Image (cartoon, rainbow, N blue to C red):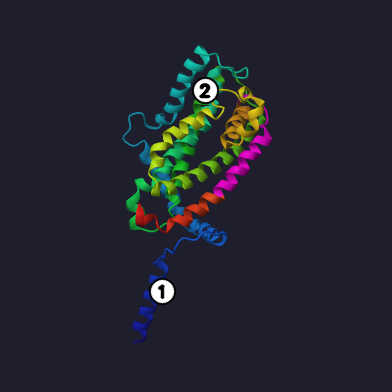
Amino acid sequence: MQNVSTSMAQTTALDARSTKVIRPPAFNLGTTLRHIREFSDYTDLFLTLSMHRIKVRYKQSVLGIAWAVLQPVSLMLIYIAIFSIVSQMPSDGLPYAVFVFAALLPWTYFSTAVSAATTSLVAHNQMVTKVYFPREILPLSYVVVGVFDFIIATTVLAGLMIYYHVAVSFVIVWAIPILLVETMFVAALSILFSAILVRFRDLGFAMPLILQLWMFATPVVYPLSKVPAKFRGWYVLNPMVGVVEGFRHVVLQRMSPDLPSLRISFLISAVLLVFSYAYFKHKEATMADII
């Protein structure tokens, strides 16, 4: 009889550990911190899903990981034809090819990661409805894929710099904090947009247009110096301005980044990340019901 009682107690304890109660939405700092701690318990799942994304992304593809550089290289060639040959866009004294490609690297990382992450919950609705895990793992796994593609594409930038005899200096280490700021911003938009898309599918149709307009509001094909000074205070409120211009400064021009604009990018990204995560967890409890 004692063995039966012990077995029942163990079974009850096991059931308590394996059962997850998804409570009604809450929107406060305390629950957000609890969700962050819970996310850390699923780190292995996050890493596994991220590696899986990378492996299947180029599986059964003829070009394989070459696709990671095909998009920025293709855009570079188009922009050279339009903005260098036809319209003679200034490039701060640098060869236009390396000038525009250095900006396309962080921009392509941003646009592809946000675009893929936005549809992640809807695209994997069976996972969302059948098993519990922190849902933010899905969009954030695509951020990791974006980082992987960025690293692969930097080899092309290195080749262009060698070809055009563009030297590097120690200030290139600034590229690390700049990319960390960008990753914060990408993660913030990824979890925010993915949660919104569950309820409003219009965002999926609007994303290509949003990203296209956003690119021309960022100094990718033109230098920041071409933006009129009277508009520059508002212009730098776009976090990608500090990221793109700062990355180009430290990699190509051997200059420290413009700290005021980079500081703005960091502050906006940090605040948006906190808000986006809180909003995502606020809406998480009802995602499986309406997805």
For this view, does 41 lie left or right of residue 261? Answer: left
Q: Name the quadrant of the N terminus.
A: bottom left
Q: Which residues are magenta?
A: 252-273
List x then y, in percent, for residue 114.
Answer: 46, 40
Check whether the beta carbons of the residues at disc 2 and disc 1 lie within 8 A of each other: no
Specify whether residue 181 is painted magenta.
Answer: no
Numbered tag placed on residue 159 in the rendering: 2
Say few, some or many: other residues with alpha carbon within 10 Å of mark 1 (under 14 / 14 to 19 / 20 or more): few
Question: Which mark lies nearer to you, 2 or 1?
Answer: 1
Q: Is residue 108 above or below residue 160?
A: below
Query: Which residue is located at x 46 percent, y 27 percent?
Result: 72
Residue 153 position in % (x across, y down) = 48, 30
Q: Residue at x 64, y 30 (%)?
A: 232
Q: Is 263 situated left or right of 73 in this image?
A: right
Identify the amino acid type marked 2. Answer: Gly
Give x and y (percent) for residue 233. 65, 33
The answer to whether residue 38 is visible is yes
In the image, 244 versus 217, the foreground residue is: 217
Where, by quadrant of the figure, is residue 259 drawn? top right
Coordinates of residue 210 in the picture (x, y in percent) = 46, 34
- Residue sitting at 56 percent across and 17 percent down? 89
Report the Cα–Cα distance between label 2 and label 1. 59 Å
Q: Which residue is mark 1?
A: 13
In terms of secondary structure, where does tag 2 sit? helix
